[in-house]
Image (cartoon, rainbow, N blue to C red):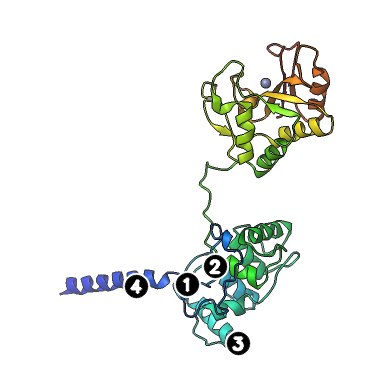
Amino acid sequence: MRKNARNLLLQGLAAMLIAGGTFGAVSATGDEANASGKPAVRGASHASTIARTGAWPKLKAGSQGTKVKSVQHLLAARGYAVSADGIYGRKTAAAVGKFQKRAGLKADGVVGAKTWNKLTALTVGLGDRGPAVKAVQVQLGVKADGVFGKNTRAAVRSFQTRAGLKVDGVVGPKAWNALITRPTPAKPKPGTAKPAGSSAALARQLLTKRGITYATKHSETVDPRSTAYRNIHDMAKGIGAATSGNSHVGYKRVPLDPRMLRALITLHDRYGYKLKISEFVGGVHGKNSRHYRGLSFDANFINGIHVGSGAPHKKVMKLCTTLGATEVRGPGDPNHNTHIHCAWK
Ligand SMILES: [Zn+2]
């Protein structure tokens, strides 16, 4: 008898848990959501990066996550003391009810479109501080310190660009809607970090310089994935430069160092040199070579003249040092009679 009662109790608990799970799901409903009736995110062509529904999610007791956290921050911004734990519990529901009552809405403790519109009826921008700023930061996935500084503004601008909104770095009604209704960005898996954006941008810039050319073959190895030509184009695409399969480090992708790329642009633009790059990260070098870490370039032609045959290699080598290279080799150094080598640390 007692055993049966216990079983019933357990079954009841399980049923409650299942119900709770469904109850807790965030749902975007058609009836109440999107009271304005028009999509809040402009630019249908951006649909691949940002959902363009503009339908506010319905949050209620049992809901969890970033959007709940933002509701809690927005309630705090209105003077309701709720902790921003991302869990829509009884205290959050009660605060929502009070807010709704004061805003002239039906006090049901559920955050739907009308409540979202009232909660987000505030604008935040550079220099602002407080919980509303935290709500923005939480949605952007940046550090939520409640201070709307230059980094937050840059993140807002970047978001507005992707969302097809006016890019002003200020969060008003449209930006709020886009921030809340967009899908949560996937966090990059550790170990798959993309090479720095600046390296990709610099590589693209470098490819516009007609005086800088790139070897399409290696001098002593055969891996075609890692020629200087492929390295710079892969870096421009943002996927990083490939090392040679037969090198000490095997085949892998590494970013090209931005200081090195900037130095090449300077050598071309400011000093007027024409250079042919024979290697970046490809080829076979010393075991601990900086080439394998994207820190070095080799050049075997300067102004169309082969290094070691009268090319002004000493001047370029000196400029490499001026531009921050800490390892500079050329004719006269072992194994460098036909190319110069500039490497950053
Ligand atoms: Zn080298």
Disc 1 versus disc 3: nearer the observer? 1
Task: Point out the tag, 1 or 3, that comes first from the N-terminus.
Answer: 1
Q: Is mark 1 within 8 Å of ligand 1?
A: no
Q: Quadrant of residue 39?
A: bottom right
Residue to which mark 2 is pinned: 181
Tell which of 212 and 298 is nearer to you.
Answer: 212
Q: Residues within 10 Å of mark 1 (few under 14, many from 20)?
A: some
Task: Point out the tag, 2 or 1, that comes first from the N-terminus.
Answer: 1
Up the image or down, 291 lies above or below 126; here it is: above
Q: Which mark is residue 28?
A: 1
Residue 124 percent location from the top left of the image: 70, 69
Q: CA distance from mark 4 to mark 2?
A: 25 Å
* Quadrant placement of the C terminus: top right
Q: Residue at x 76, y 34 (%)?
A: 265
Give the residue at the far left of this rendering: 1
Disc 4 versus disc 2: nearer the observer? 2
Up the image or down, 216 lies above or below 157; here it is: above
Q: Residues within 10 Å of mark 3 (few under 14, many from 20)?
A: few
